[in-house]
Image (spheres, grey):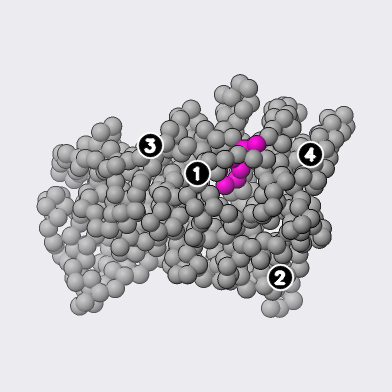
Amino acid sequence: MPDLNLGVIGNSSVAALIDPKGRIVWYCLPRFDGDPVFCSLLNGEDPAEGFAEILLENLASASQEYLGNTSVLVTTLTDSHGATLRITDFAPRFKQYDRIFRPAMLIRRIDVVSGLPAIRIRIRPAGDHGRMRPARTRGSNHIRYLLPDSVLRLTTDAPISYIETESAFVLTTPINMVLGPDESVPQGLGHLVRDFQERTIDYWIEWTRYLSVPFEWQDAVIRAAITLKLCHFEETGAMVAALTTSIPEAANTERNWDYRACWMRDAYLSVQALNRLGATKTMEDFLGYINTIVAREADRDLKPVYGIIPDIPLTEIKVESLAGYRGMGPVRIGNLAQEQIQNDSYGSIILAAAQMFFDRRLPVRGDLDLLDRLEELGQKAVAVAFRPDAGIWEYRGRQAVHTHSATLCWAGCDRLAKIAASLDQPERAQRWRGEADRIRTTILEQGWNPAIGSFTTVFGGDTADASLLLLQEVGLVSAADPRFVSTLAHITGALRHGDDLYRYYVADDFGLPTTAFTICTFWYIDALAATGQREEARRLFEGMLARRNHLGLLSEDIDPKTGELWGNYPQTYSLVGLIVCAMRLSKSWEEAFWRGW
């Protein structure tokens, strides 16, 4: 039965998910949002196609790990006689000719560790979202799979006839396999694979070397950071919310969404987390993506989510040809959220760009031209701050003035005031400070309910949701403000279930949620730490780390009863929460290293 104990390999161009036995169950071409040529993750419990695997006969055990601080994944399989093989999977990524080489390619190497393992190689891509099994043509060292709009090519030094017939054979020498576009390999395959693997390993080791990691939980933070980078579609600068579509938020529900797109708020939080670690290049690329969006939206009315290529619409459709995760359809392509009004988008973009004006490490700093463009978004934030929207939780059936959305509009104005001051623009700074103060005053009046002692989800409301935990994070109120402390207490009583936090406690378009939203638990941990409850925060954080899968990754949701991961995977929101909490809760290097621990 499929689950989310999956490894992730990628190169910020393509990505694949691999199960604990080495089966590739998800791989889209030509990019993250493309046709899933390996789609068995979403095709029921025992799919006949849509995967690539190495079957070890008489399999007895399997283990899986990443090679150090890299995205190179190693799966080790052992049979009942002790014969063992090792599968190494990666997507090439390294510097070449003064740029990053990141082809739409997966590489798989199979090595004998001991004995004489007998294997079958099964390559069964599917086309048009699982509707067709492609025709094949073969050459002396390759097989071409003819998909509706492209060709998937397997180049290998394995016996082609064994692969075509899926026959068993004994593995005695290493096998190299390259899956990708219909391009010939211009050199010896073994040499190419070894060279690409070494250079990819070197790249990731170099990338992680410059991360400003906390003293504690370094492995968890590094793995989260690498995975965030894998969710960055570097060609355009977009950051997808997850690499999958339609993994349900809970069992047997229709809360199945396509997350292979770029939400403004999610991308801002991902960029912010990488910035905290010192990986600022992603922010620079994301601003290029934002500049393209803003230039295309003449009236500056931003959508909350865009495709990784902004011009491509996210029209939401149901795909009947795929049964769904464990048969729990529907499978959706595209996302209706693009048609919603979510007013926090303007503030999110300004927050993402603000570091450009203050970080002196950056080769290109924010200037008056960038301020001009951000002010256009600030004007929209002022205009929509108190207009009804679908809110952060993207309610499909109702709109209201959401406190979180208004707060992000305030945050955009607040940062513009600081940016203008840093550029010696006192009149502009004064103007934006005035707008920020006006919005803040209204939020404090209309977003606070003294009867329940809490800020509220919507203006004039009587319920709270987890997004209110961010009020201190963005600076609307301090963590010591009695109103925030009281809000935290109210949320604890209303939304905390055991060690997990739910998003809200009212029914939405699909009823009451039955799984905890992982990022909300991290927000809660962060709020506890900010209000001085560090021991409880650390206990909960350690508990969340224990909830990760065997490779240290998280999806969107957790079932509080079983601890099982649900929702799209890997979820950038969740990994952001892990990074932020680790950096807040960790002992300092000085405290731990120099003074002893």
Q: Residue 534: give its label.
A: 2
Mark 3 vs mark 1, foreground winner is 3
Question: Pointers 2 and 4 in contact (CB under 8 A)?
Answer: no
- State how far apart marks 3 and 1 are (Cα): 19 Å
| Viewer-nearest residue: 568 or 83 | 568
What residue did someone put label 4 on?
439
Name above or below for residue 299 compared with residue 593: above
What residue did someone put label 1 on?
240
Question: Pointers 3 and 1 in contact (CB under 8 A)?
Answer: no
Q: Judging from the image, what secondary structure is the residue with disc 3 in?
A: strand
| Viewer-nearest residue: 402 or 380 | 402
> Disc 4 marks which amino acid?
Ile
Q: Main secondary structure of the magenta part?
A: loop
Residue 527, horizontal then vertical, whole percent = 70, 61
Residue 340, horizontal then vertical, whole percent = 55, 35
**Which residue is located at x 49 percent, y 52 percent?**
511
Q: Earlier in the sequence, mark 4 or mark 1?
A: 1
Give the crowd class for mark 4: few <14, some 14-19, many >=20 residues within 10 Å. Answer: many
Q: Judging from the image, what secondary structure is the residue with disc 1 in?
A: loop
Quadrant of the image containing the N terminus: bottom left
Q: Judging from the image, what secondary structure is the residue with disc 4 in?
A: helix
What residue did someone put label 3 on?
317
Mark 2 vs mark 4, foreground winner is 4
Q: Earlier in the sequence, mark 2 or mark 4?
A: 4
The stretch of residues the image draws in magenta is: 388-394
- State how far apart marks 3 and 2 are (Cα): 45 Å
**Which residue is located at x 76 percent, y 68 percent?**
532
Residue 398 in view in this figure:
yes
